[in-house]
Amino acid sequence: MSAPAITITGSPGRAVLARFMKHRLAVASAIVLCLLVSLSLLAPLIEHLLGLDAEAVDLFARYAPPSAAHPLGTDELGRDLLLRLLYGGQVSLFVGLTATIVAAVIGTTIGLCSGYAGGRIDAFVMRVTDGVIALPVLPLLIVLAAVDLNKLGLPDELLGSGNVSLYRIVAIVALVGWTTVARLVRASTLSLKTRPFVLAARAQGAGAFRIMLRHILPNLASPIIVATTLSVGNVILLESVLSFLGLGIQPPLPSWGNLLTGAQETIWEAPGLAFYPGLLIFITVIAFNFIGDGLQDALDPRSRDSRTAARN
Amino acid sequence: MYAFLIRRLVHSLVVLFVMSVVIYGLMGLMPGDPVDLMISADPDITSEDAARLRAIYGLDQPLWSRYANWLGAALTGDFGYSRLYAQPVWQAIWPALTNTLVLLVSSLALALAIALPAGIFAATRPYSLADYGINFAAFAGISMPPFWLGILLILVFAVMLGWLPAGGTAASAGVSGLWEQLQFLILPVASLTIAGVGGHTRYMRASMIETLRQDYIRTARAKGLSESRVVLGHALRNAMIPVVTVIALDLGVLFSGALITETVFAYPGMGKLIFDAIMGNDYNLALVGLLMATALTLIGNLLADVAYAGLDPRISYEELDQ
Amino acid sequence: MTTFKQLLVIGGLILCTVFSPTGATAKDNLVIGITQYPSTFHPNIDSMLAKSYVHGLTRRPITVINAEWDTVCLLCEELPTLENGGAKLEKTPDGKDGIAVTYKIIDEAVWGDGTPITVDDVIFTWETGKHPKTGVSSTEGYRRILSIDRIDDKTFTLHVDRRTFDYNNLSTMGLLPAHIERSKFANPEAYKTQTAFDTDPMNPGLFMGPYVMTEAKTGSHMVFERNPKWWGKEPAFDKITVRVIENTTTLEANLLSGGIDMISGELGLNVDQALAFEKRHGRKYTILFHPGLIYEHIDLMLDNPVLQDIRVRQALMYAIDRKAISERLFGGKQPVANTGINPLDWIYADDVPRYVHDPARADALLNDAGWTRGANGMRVNAAGEPLRFEIMTTAGNRTRELVEQVLQSQWKEQGIDIRIRNEPARVFFGETVSKRKFSAMAMFAWISSPESVPRTTLHSEEIPTEANSWSGQNYTGFSNPEMDALLEQIELELDREKRRELWQRLQHIYATELPALPLYFRANSFILPKWLGDIQPTGHQFPTTLWVENWSVNK
């Protein structure tokens, strides 16, 4: 019985975990991220405990210094900075995670089909991929910013909720971001489909769909997971850059990107307003990068070889 | 190999043509036209004025016919007139292009000068303290919002320390000496380098680790060569292949990707030019700028493939062509 | 330990810079920072603030509105009026009420290449202006001139087809040098790309101000040097560099690090940035705040059935505290607006409805209009529909975004649900506003000149439609016969006192009917070195640079 070639025999999960735990920076990053995610999710609770309203504007308490009532002080409209940061974290993390997952799903599907089909279909899909990679993101963003979503038949409740800019960003990132995963998956599929276990399955009469799903996809999991983890950070950075250009998440919905952009004009008067969102973006992105690095080491057994190789 | 090159060049030209249609289409899909923007800036424009201006700028014609006109002229070498800068497109692009190339070439050179040694050093001592340190620094550079980094650099080195100018070009300050010109480049180049060096370091490290695992390296080691001879003499050439590939693939992105740095440092380059052209509804300028970026990406792809196949005998052009 | 030391060092450096007098010495070379680069240098194609600003250094209009908001001569000897005989009422050839206005160009006025400025230039400018193919943005002013009589080389009479109260204002006609431009105009259709202003912008013959442009690097900077042929007062600086720095944080950093000497008020920091700057560096710089004719307001979509109810519009005004916004956000530097007419304008009416923050009044009006508070405190009508509006503005304009959020919060207290949806300026002005696609509220500003008749924004014929190719700026769809009549009367009323009455009535209608919600008048903030004096902010579209020869250096 030909087992999938790359997965480790025995108890793979535990081995992977054990290898991951050796990457100390990755472990530390995972802990920090878990903390950030839970704090962000707990924002409403913290809001309640502090007895504050995250959206309440108080023109008489602008730029207030940290105090018992406002642990990190207040922003340019007298709102509590800590709560703004936590709610901003929800948005930034949501954008980062959803967009990359959607992109990964699209990329995997396209890459898998293209690589498995091969031939002209594959060549055509790869040229389209090249085109998408070369596609200018900016005009696309502006066009999408102007599309009348009501005409697309989206429910009014969704559009009215003020989160439109959020979904737009997710959609745009997914639309242009699938190419990396697609190329990766396509290349691996090309080589995997000639492996004995795939040929054997085909000989046994398994359909193309079944082979792709059952035999090829599981072997692609590691590179996809690694690539996706590494790109979450990039998307969070991209969101901040788009905010800087005025094309990002729109207020009053806070995101780390627009908090940072909004604060740069008052960086002299209230450095903290710019410092904290910048720091959170930095920590989060670097954490995702380290986790991606750790996962790569853990999921790719060859890097373990390199460790032993280095010792001799 | 020539057959491969020619076929790929033809492919690239086709992609370029399709992209020009797509970009023109996207620009046309974008709401409003230049006259709408003029109207909102000048209350004295009447409806007759608006119709007249649309006719003058050809905006009353359907999109495809405008594109056909542009393409016809472009094929004869006339890429049109930039409405935003009131100059022929090439005249507007040329200075921005040279500025951007100066910025990008110096930051790429600097980034490689740091990344290659750091990557090799880390690869020869994987999982050592030095490796962790280099990894950390590499990720730290990648993980900073670029405009935030730029502003921090300006705050510290221009405003607090007063060592360097806070943006602009030497010409804008009316100085022309070599040192003065360099001074204006230091902060933007540093900002781009910090953001770029991490990626290159990581690629170099990964690629070197991979190469050092190869059999021929073991053989070299077995022959009793010193470790530095092994790494620099034998492994480096092969380890460079993926790094060069990645740089080539990134050409197009580099080209327009300096937008943020250019904006923060008031440095008039291509990224800013393209962005302003899009925002200011300057079809011709935006189209040519974006097409140049696309062309660079395609050339980069081609170069990457050529380098890949040329440097690594295990890969054939036929394989790449599939 | 090391980090602590480093912190100390950096801290020390901060102190040093705070107390050291950087860049505070007078010099022959002035460097000005602005935030925008002009797109074309042709004076009559595409109106743009950055262009007016640099043209102020190099060019002079025939007449101009000065800092006291009076129309005065710059290129002419004496302002023609009906009283001094320079202007005479007459009938047009087809028997309508017309006017003849005679100007005399200053004798010594010459172009920068020494060619005298003559009536030929005026006639040539008029010909290009009214020609339909030249690409001149606004031709209305030129088409109103029926003919130009040449009295002598320097004197001309305009025959205008109507008697407007500003008959002697020639400020929007940007004089063109016929001796350079005539050959470029041979093919009118190609003129907009052939004009020497863009093909040869450093030609001194294009200029007639105290400075000529000697260098222009697109998107970066422009350099101006003394015009040896300038006939007026000698300016204080040999050279003026105008640097374009779009990012205001970088702009400020350049000022602090000595890269620029001053930040222009016309295109510089917004008021809250300037206020913050004043707090930290007020002792080292002169900071002038000057409220002007930039009218920030919210256009209401009057096709929206909910907003058609005047009680709802008035309640929206009573529900917000514009005084608090002006004082808390803008340090009181940006006065609250009652209508689009600035209190500094002589036609300003004092007795219009003012809508001071009055929650009780807003509550009563809304209840009266059938919008009562529901279970969660938000208002609903009898059918259970929520009182909900969408507000839009230009994304990335931080001040507007802040004001928007304050208003949202204040309206929420009145049970009015406001959804914010901002768009890039490109989309907002290019489509949403100009094609009337906003559903309820659009926040933006009008920049106007003193006593400018708001015909394009309030006349019912100026509502943009597909049929008029979306021209006109009555985006709200305001249609009021009395307002239409007033707008037409005011323009043609030559008697100042009678005109004032019409203006009062106009403001009264505006403030009562509320086609738009007036917010405040924006202020320009000038940040100048202590050694620079006599810059007089105007508060309207004519920039301070038009009087650059008066700027002085206190040694």
Image (cartoon, rainbow, N blue to C red):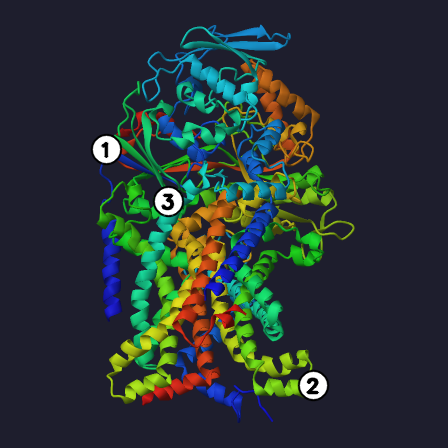
Give the quarter of the figure containing the C terminus of chain C. top left
Residue marked by disc 3: B95
Depth order, front residue of A91/A193: A193
Residue marked by disc 2: A205
Give the quarter of the figure containing the N terminus of chain C. bottom left
Q: Nearer the viewer, mark 2 or mark 1?
A: 2
Q: Can you give x and y, in whole percent of width and height, for residue C456 in the image?
A: 60, 29
User: In the rendered image of this protein, does residue C536 appear above or below residue A119?
Assistant: above
Asked if residue C96 shows in the view, the reply is yes
Q: Can you give x and y, in whole percent of width and height, for residue C12 in the image?
A: 23, 57
- The structure residue drawn at horizontal position 25% and vertical position 35%, both measured from the top left corner, is C29
Residue marked by disc 1: C28
- Kind of residue at disc 1: Asp
Q: Can you give x and y, in whole percent of width and height, for residue C534 in the image?
A: 31, 28
- Kind of residue at disc 2: Gly
User: In the rendered image of this protein, does residue C63 appear above or below residue C444?
Assistant: above
Residue at disc 2, secondary structure:
loop
Asked if residue B139 shows in the view, the reply is no
Q: Evaluate whether label 3 is on the same chain as label 1.
A: no
Q: Quadrant of residue C63?
A: top left
User: In the rendered image of this protein, does residue C104 appear above or below residue C190?
Assistant: above
Depth order, front residue of C75/C475: C75
- Kind of residue at disc 3: Pro
Q: Chain of mark 3?
A: B
Spatial CA distance of label 2 from label 3 is 63 Å
The reply, left or right, for residue C190 in relation to residue A122 is left
The reply, left or right, for residue C308 in relation to residue B112 is right
- The structure residue drawn at horizontal position 24% and vertical position 48%, both measured from the top left corner, is B180
The reply, left or right, for residue A133 in relation to residue C254 is right
- The structure residue drawn at horizontal position 26% and vertical position 48%, both measured from the top left corner, is B181
Q: Can you give x and y, in whole percent of width and height, for residue B63 in the image?
A: 62, 43
